[in-house]
Image (cartoon, coloured by chain):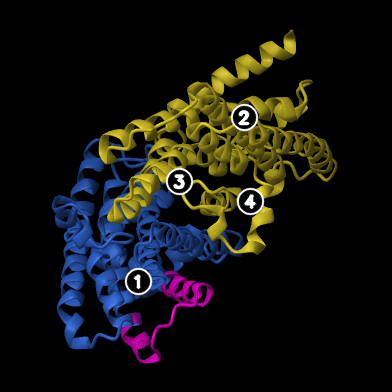
Chain colours: A blue, B yellow
Amino acid sequence: MTSARIFFIGGLMSYRALFGWMNPWIFVPSLLVSPVCQILLFAYIGRSAGVGTDEFYVIGNALNYAAIPCMFAMTFTIGGERFGQTLGLVLATPARRIPLFLGRSMPVIANGWFVAMFGVVVGSLLLDVDIPASAWPLMALVVAVGSLASTGLGLVMGAINLVYRDGATMGNVLFLVLLIFTGTNVALDDLPDWMAAVGRCLPLTHAIEATRMLADGATWGAVRGLVGTELVIGLVYLAVGLGAIRLFERLSRTGATLDRI
Amino acid sequence: MNRLRQQVVCFWLQLKILLFSPFEGFLAVVFPLMFATAALLVYQVNGDPAAMLYAGIGAAAMGIWTSQTVSATTLVQRERRAGTLELVVAAPTPFSLVLLPITFAMATIGLYSVVATILWDRWLFDIALHVANWPLFVLSILMATVTIALFGFLLSVTAVRYRTSWALGAALEYPGWLLCGFVVPLDLLPAVLRPLSWALAPTWAVEGMRAAAAGESPWSDLAICGAVGLVYAALAAWLGVRLITAARRDATLALT
């Protein structure tokens, strides 16, 4: 019961307290305007190059942008506590780490899902992309799985943030890696083999591919494997993140580096 | 003479600070470089050499824009967080003359990004820049640098009372890359957006770069670019005095 309370109440409180994303002055420009602008940028690059369709870029970039709230939120779960000088208190509590940190990831996954879906809807409206109504429910499900996988990577970053203080730079670099390697703007078949191989180990790659297939009329059976792979990748990153938090927590206690900013 | 010394010292000091900052130094180069890579990967699918050269020239200048957006909008906020804003505002040197060399230092980071992107394009995509007139091409890049610095000056002044100005700066990144025609021809954009493109000085600088590369005269583009940049400077200087005076009068400088 205590773990459930930490998971739900602690997660929600942490989300609202740490990120201030209920503030529209941050939320609107960074999580609603920017993804739409990224979609438009690459859709026009695609038109200029004569490569891909508008739908290809709308889905790729909308899902790619889900990585921003997912990764940064989890990173700043640690960094924000440090900045607020509460990290030591959080880690000194006897609360179990799994509900403590997974609880913080739940609102983040929901937020990432909303940002990605907003990008798909608004991008489709602006660029006149026609996605069949029957595809939307399954697309929403796949986007949620992609958000979960991105949040898993974010948890790994949060763990690293225990020993490396510049989470903003690290988050941006990883976002760029996802932009290039996950088939966001260039299909994996058109990327060099080594880049495609790296992309297949990253979150979002399979979710983007599955969402594109659904938008083109594919059935659940056709994308089930991709969604399953995305889910497994996300769970592996979550497990690695939780393990890394435990490891780096111990290292930061040993080196007395917990509150170094 | 004192003014010149203040400008040079401030520029050099800020440049050193930026170069040591992972976020404003390293990332200001890597972020546009990776977006340029993503754009060039799209162009590479069809492998049209002319299109690659077109995108390669524009992609080179993307970093100058990036060097200003987030950094310039958060400039005042950084001083505020460091507890030095009141000191800077109260100093006998006009506030605008403090901000100006800082934005030029940021634009210099963007200049480094130009060189890095040109080399990156060459090594990774085998894009050899065929430039008919190198002196005018370099002049166009410098004009882009100076006018984007002036745009950053305007941004930093405008955001003086905007607590979360970094979000505004981040949101300006993609629209700037799109509207200035760095990697997309302006003809492709909806007609309603054209006036916005014309009001952005880098649009003209990038046109100048392409004209110089093609052996055409870039002078008319550069003249417009310079004129738009001067408008930014005049507007920023005017706004700077009024916004700072208002902030001091209302005791809102600290935004606490």
Q: Secondary structure at mark 4?
A: helix
Q: Nearer the viewer, mark 3 or mark 1?
A: 1
State how far apart marks 3 and 1 are (Cα). Answer: 22 Å
Residue A211 found in image quarter: bottom left
Amino acid type for the residue under numbered disc 1: Met
In the image, is A169 to the left or to the right of B46?
right
Name the spot of residue B100 as percent of width and height, x first.
Answer: 67, 28
Residue receiving disc 3: A83
Please tell me whether the stretch drawn in magenta is mainly helix, strand or loop: helix
Q: Residues within 10 Å of mark 2 (few under 14, many from 20)?
A: many
In the picture shown, does residue B182 fall above or below B230?
A: below
Q: Are marks 3 and 1 on the same chain?
A: yes
Mark nearer the N terminus (2 vs 4) = 2
Disc 3 chain ID: A
Residue receiving disc 4: B197
Q: Which mark is residue A106?
A: 1
Residue receiving disc 2: B146
State how far apart marks 3 and 2 are (Cα). Answer: 36 Å
Q: Nearer the viewer, mark 3 or mark 4?
A: 4
Q: In this view of the protein, which residue sits in the foreground, A170 or A65?
A: A65
Q: Which mark is residue A61?
A: none
Asked if the residues shown at circle 1 and circle 4 are in contact, with their CB atoms under 8 angstroms apart, the answer is no
Q: Secondary structure at mark 2?
A: helix
What's the magenta region? A114-139
State how far apart marks 2 and 4 are (Cα). Answer: 18 Å
Amino acid type for the residue under numbered disc 2: Val
Q: Quadrant of the N terminus of chain A?
A: bottom left
Amino acid type for the residue under numbered disc 4: Ser
Disc 2 chain ID: B
